[in-house]
Amino acid sequence: MQLDSNAEFTSVLADGMRIDWDVPIVMDDGIVLRADLFRPAEGRHPVILSYGPYGKGLAFREGYVSAYERLVGDHPDVLANSSGKYLNWETVDPERWVPDGYAVLRIDSRGAGRSPGFLDPRSPREVDDIVQCIEWAAAQPWSTGKVGMCGISYYATNQWQVAAKNPPHLAACCIWEGSNDVFREQARHGGILCTFRQHWYDIQVKTVQHGRGERGPRHPITGELACGPETLSDEELARNRIDIGQAHYEHVLCDDFYASRTPDLAKITVPLLSAANWGGHGLHLRGNVEGFLQASSPQKWLEFHGLEHWTEFYTDYGVALQKRFFARFLKGEDAAWPDRPRVLLQVRHVDRFVERAENEWPLARTRWTRFYLDVARRALRTEPPGDGSLQYDALGDGVTFMSEPLTQETEITGPSALKLFVSSSTNDADIFAVLRAFSPGGEEVVFQGAIDPHTPLAQGWLRASHRKLDHARSLPYRPWHPHDALRPLRPGEIAELDVEIWPTCIVLPAGYRLALTLLGKDYEYPGISGGRLSNFRNEMRGSGPFLHDDPRDRPPEVFGGKTTIHTNSTSPSYVLLPIIPPKE
């Protein structure tokens, strides 16, 4: 290994790459962010940039042990051309990208890892930082001036924010399972507080906050302290970061706090590839769909896949897709990404995925089909049932409506919506809607989701007091709630609710049944536990880490009463499902 050092950073030649460790990037307020750069030894190259809070000095295999072991154990292609030692969580593997002529730039976000400053994920300041980093990278002598962003989850989420700013040298974005609406997709599903962000912050971000120094990890290759040279007290660290959980708890409505962290997607014009996970309910799905639909980019594509949210990003399937996209938009190789259908589906069957190209989303040939809630029989029917009502304990196991066995193979692909007429014994109610499938033998059909191994078909949430609709933005299959005002219930009063159910895809054989479960708590798979992953606090029980269990947000005197579903010929309760006929 050849070593060159100077006062600013260390440069080495190793494993066929020029590696610059801890490169300084000075922001307009004087803060110096730190980055690791991997590139071919000579020449100018397009840049693959990522910026995030997980610590560039924390190795994937050390910081995310269970996810890494599952990834490389189940998918040996991930390490077929890589040692894995440069792999970081949710960012590209330099050993698989540098040989193809890319410079890979990983930047520790402000306040995280080796970068000092106030830690405030997804803040406007972070977005400004990334814009400056893009322009810095474009101006370097090893750069062609074309910069692309690529990464999973956090490293995808901030791409929506940055792309809306249209930095001059941002040439393309590969947004892999990245949300963009902080209120609806992260903080408060349907207005109900989700505790995931607080747990995520505690386990994955605060543990690599800048200033942990000797109490943090060391870079596995350089030996440097991954969280900076100084070691601060817990009190000093707390003063130097936002309290995300408290902020989400205090901000009940979609106010300026969320607006400042949510991009105007219509301002995005850069070429983009948006990749969503069918099993990503709670975080890794809706944003990719809405981002694709709302972006103004003339060159945009939407892809759907399954399995864990980190898996297909690193497999040969995902890497080949990413490289073809960037070859066109960073290298100008038009043949690598020719004119192609706008939508690529890995269509989910009960036992496999089948690739299929489409031209739009939702699919134009969708047969939007109402399945009415028959409260007397607890059934789903395609014909409106008679009048009736059904009451259940609001915090209990709820009620399930089951269809008759399907008479033929049936595909459901797209978003769904639930129309409910509800009353409560209190002044509010939380609706958790779960779309499910059952085999002819009565066993529930679940899937490896983005996180949880026992994920149902689809989920949706709505707090009754948040039922106000924005009629201009709502669609029959995707209601839009502005979440800007509370409308409490009067006990016993029937209210009309429109519940957004996130998209899904499933091909069910004849004889299987569809079901809709309504309850006032998180779905739990009735079978065996999904165990635990090292980077999540809770046991996997069907909803992954995306739980709504903060007692401050759901006091039992308000949410522990009785909920009643009503239906009649003029006001029927139903779920609208996207049935897909075969292509002609």
Image: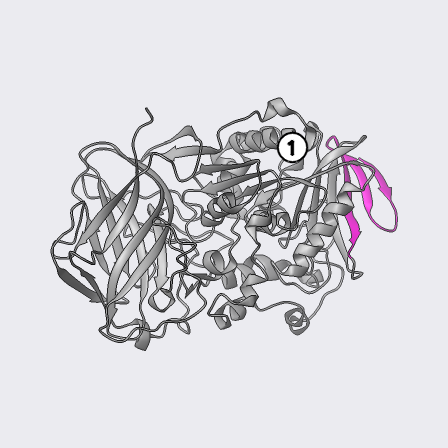
Which residue is pictured at 48% across the width and 44% down the height? Answer: 293
> Camera-side residue: 360 or 34?
360
**Amino acid, disc 1:** Phe
Could you say whether the residue bearing mark 1 is in a helix, strand or loop? Answer: helix
Given the current orientation, which residue lies at the most extreme front position? 472
Residue 465 is drawn in which quadrant? bottom left
Q: Is residue 194 left or right of residue 328?
A: left
Residue at point 42%, 74% (across, down):
552
What residue span does the magenta drawing correspond to? Answer: 1-27
Q: Is residue 222 visible?
A: no
User: Picture coordinates of residue 457 (x, y %)?
Assistant: 33, 45
Could you tell whether 314 is left or right of 213 in the image? left
Name the foreground residue: 547 vs 573.
Answer: 573
> Does the magenta-highlighted stretch encompass residue 24?
yes
- Residue 310 seen: yes
- Taking depth in this image into account, of 252 and 20 the one nearest to the observer is 252
Against 345, is 445 above or below? below
Q: Residue 390 appears in which quarter of the rendering?
A: bottom left
Magenta-colored segment: predominant secondary structure: strand
Q: Position of residue 237 (x, y in %)?
A: 66, 69
Q: Position of residue 333 (x, y in %)?
A: 66, 25
Disc 1 target residue: 329
